[in-house]
Amino acid sequence: MSRPIQIRTHPLPFLLLLEWLLLFAVAITEALSIHFRRFHNLPSLTIISLVCFGLLGLRMPTGKLIHKILYTGLEILLILLTGIVSGRGIRLFPFLYIILVIRSCLIFQRPGRIVITSLSFVLFILTLIHRFQYVPDVPVLQERLRFTLLSFALSFGLSLVFVLLLMNAVLAERQMREKLAIANEQLRQYALRIEDQATLQERNRIARDIHDSLGHSLTALNLQLETALKLWQSNPAKAQTFLTQAKNLGSQALREVRQSVSAMRSDPLHGQSLETAIAALVAEFRSSTGFSPTYQISLQHPISVEVQTAVYRITQEALTNIWKHAAANAVRIDIQTTAKSLHWKIQDNGKGFVLNQNTTGFGLQSMRDRVLALKGEFQIKSTPGAGCCISATIPLPRLVA
């Protein structure tokens, strides 16, 4: 089964409009020429050829090379037919050759465009020579004719070259725009996948925190309440003790819920400065543990919102880990910037841990991932009984003013 001819609408509508304007100019020229000639046996053939030539621009072949060659051959045939008149040989229609070159640029690659442009120039020269071969053999007229032919041919040849170069530039820019649009779409899809993956990881972390901390607190709270109910009649004093413990567990569960909600916020800083956001974290930590971390923040150079968010998140994660696991009573936070990087450090006097055994937890891994995503360096120093020190260095891109 033969493959059908593939066609497409004109890829550049403004060029199609330009073609029709040129064809209209040719038609006006033909109409004026017919009006002032005494013999015009074939005016209808000229008009029909012009109309067919213009309609060919509505659809162009995009499949096999043979279809493109046949299409171009038909265009050349129509150009030749358009120039035929009774008893006068072939007249000149340079606009038609310009349109032929424009269309060839839309259906052929660069070698094909050069071939069609060269062929158009050759046909134009042959037509020109044929048109003026009946000039009287007068030396003065012959000299003027040669000069006119040379000037006309040179001007038309330069016009064809200009059209060819212009079309190549237009099509190259169009292709670059299409490639850029495709690349932008691929980048957008990739960013969406990365965002979805990061969101999923964050949800998994929050789910694990809820299961490990909030779930444990609520389970213990339920046991305390059940015990208090059993002892309420027989031993009210002891039941009161269990109710007090249940209340403490409820307060702890409420703090953990608030921390989980805070971790889910898309904009944790809420438009605040990093200093204000860190101060709020310290105040929240103090309300949960009873002691206040000391902190020093020196931001002498501007930092992007992305870096600010990352610093806030790793500080939040570090304080959460200290509250849950470190059993510390002293914490210090240092954040400062240089012209090229941001230096972040948090240190506690808690129970510490063995580095090779306790550095793969979800909290520490999340902090490491955030720093590495910004092409920074992440470091942990800790020994059992001697506390822990976590530091990070994040390069600062130069912000455009």
Image: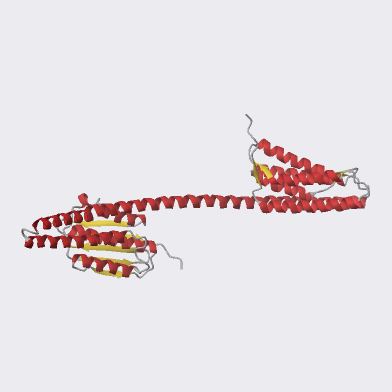
Residue 4 lies, in percent from the top left, at 64, 35
Quadrant of image for the N terminus? top right
In this view, 249 is above or below 60: below
Front one among 386 and 62: 62
Image quarter of residue 302: bottom left
Report the number of numbered marks: 0
Q: Residue furthest top?
A: 1
Q: Residue furthest front?
A: 233
Front one among 212 and 328: 212
Front one among 280 and 180: 280
Residue 85 lies, in percent from the top left, at 87, 44
Front one among 98 and 74: 74
- Horizontal placement of 297 versus 148: left or right? left
Q: Is residue 83 visible?
A: no
In this view, 179 is above or below 264: above
Residue 391 lies, in percent from the top left, at 27, 60
Image quarter of residue 74: top right
Q: Is residue 179 visible?
A: yes
- Horizontal placement of 18 versus 358: left or right? right
- Horizontal placement of 82 versus 224: left or right? right
In this view, 362 is above or below 274: above
**Color style of the picture:** secondary structure
Residue plotted at (84% across, 47% down):
91
Residue 298 lies, in percent from the top left, at 31, 70
Residue plotted at (67% across, 43% down):
60
